Image (spheres, coloured by chain):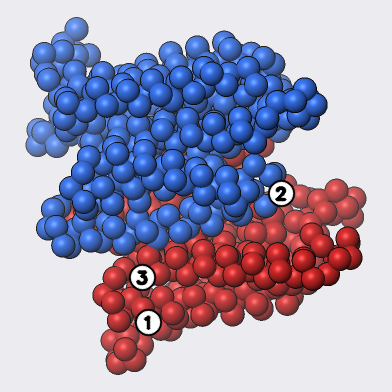
Amino acid sequence: MHFIFESGFFSSQPVRVALTIGGVVAFVSAVVGVFTVVRGQSFAGHTLTDVSTAGGSGAFLAGMSPLLGFVGFGIVGAGAMDLIGVQRVRGRDLATGVVLGAATGIAALFLYFDTTSRATTGATQQILFGSIFTIDPGEITVVVAFGAVSLAVIAVIYRPLLLASISPDIAAARGVPIRAVGLGFMLALAVSVGLSSLAIGSILSTALLIGPAATALRITRRVGRAVIAAIVIGVATTWVGVLLAYDSYYWSAGHNAYPVSFFVVAVIFLAYLASGLPAIGTRTPGMPSVAP
Amino acid sequence: MFSAFMTNAWVIATIVAILAGVVGFFVVLRGSAFPAHAIPNGAFAGAAAANLLGLNTLLGLAVFSVLAALGIGRLGRRGRHDVVTALALVMMLALGALFLSRTTEYEPAIYSLLFGEVLGVSTTELLPVAGLAAASIAAIFVLYRPLVLSSIIPEIAEARGVRNHRMEIAFLVVLAVATATTVPVVGALLIFSLLIGPPAAARSFTDRPPLAILLSIAIALVTVWAAIASSYASNWPIGFFVGVFGAFAYGIGRTWAAWRRTRTFAPFSAR
């Protein structure tokens, strides 16, 4: 056992915090992620992570918890994207891209202030690439609360969201308020992205959102089952990543541990590639059809 | 502001703006905003790897961004394109973070690679950048007609013997080379603003490709020059100004298009 779990893995306080927060965040991201993939909004999801980068670095500058900045800016960004029309398919990527460009510009400015005026090193690294081992245990309550809000929104709009995601035309014909459902989903997405930004860093958080969900949707086409599969994959990959990062401390004599976010992203990426292996030979180009 | 050590900054920023104006037009036309965002992040990993191994940064940038482009093109044939792009993007970023964590100059290196460092350009760096930029623009020029056709109406392009998938790969490679050239100047995250903002604004003013390309170059030049001047005056990072001015140009374009729509009532010219 000591070969896999290096000594002190389960008794270490930072590890327990990392496993708890990582688990909660992976759970929420997986649920929201399945809808993000089905709706083809990966780019919008990724843009929100860059918007939350600006928020996180701004909060750091103001001396607040980055989480509040991540989530706050994410919600504002979601509203802005809805306003300039990311719901329409035509021109959607452009509107998203412009928000993304402006957000990274603002993030550049805040991070510049973080590193110069406050004389605190590590801000850039912590905001962009995360450091789940250094999260304050007190944050767990806030993380769980935000996660619950995001899941609650999804639960409330589950059926109309599902219909609007799979076939917007039928949903519109049945009187589903597509715009309102889309906006509600963007809010849940913003909160979820804020959480994953805290866990693995704002510009890597797309991995937790898209990776497990895309892997699950390759395994099963039924959205309900895909949500469950995505949760399992997301939580498992996150925990494996944390474990590998902890163990990597012992890999070299210099005790120079590798960044934990790298392992989480790498494991998720490998899981996605592995899920595509059985499909080689049976060519299904383009979008796989999904069923409720 | 125009002193000797600033000359290189002005020259290289001008090259970058022209390149971004041309290549960005096709990014906007083809709707490849997401790959255009992902490939620079691959370049970030390449620069980090070169930094770690002590190799030439431009080499690392070029190799990794071309690999990212081919990877996105290849994986995108099976599976969802946007999903593949997103995952390739974060994987590259994570690799970059890993490489940089092995070096001693972690924090400043991350910052300058992601957000740019226009003021530190040396004269020896100018020549390869100019050469690669010229090569990218020449490639676009050669591919011009089939590329425009396959971007606007892929079905007709296919019927005329244009291989759309090959065209996609070719364009992604050009995009990758252009990216490798520009990342050290404006940074991995902000080259994207330059590739999207000015061309998107240009397309709000005209539908004719040659005119739109020229306009896109002009807007990109104004954006970059204004960004350098503001950065010099305020001491704030250039990336901030590029990002904000790019979005501002797009805003003006959208406003102009909306204003024109209210004046002309012809249903076919309104888009």
Whole-percent x, y for residue B74 in the image: 61, 40
Q: Is residue A180 left or right of residue B94?
A: right
Q: Colour of chain A?
A: blue
Q: Which mark is residue A90?
A: 2
Q: Colour of chain B?
A: red
What residue did someone put label 3 on?
B238
Tell me whether the residue at label 1 lies in contact with that at label 2, contact meaning CB atoms closer than 8 angstroms.
no
Indicate the quadrant where residue A284 lies.
top right
SS at circle 1: helix
Give amino acid for label 1: Ala
SS at circle 2: loop
Indicate the quadrant where residue B175 lies.
bottom right
Q: Is residue A118 left or right of residue A52?
A: left
Work out whether residue A45 or residue B90 is closer to the camera in this orientation and state it: A45
Give amino acid for label 2: Arg
What residue did someone put label 1 on?
B229
Q: Residue at x 39, y 45 (%)?
A: A73
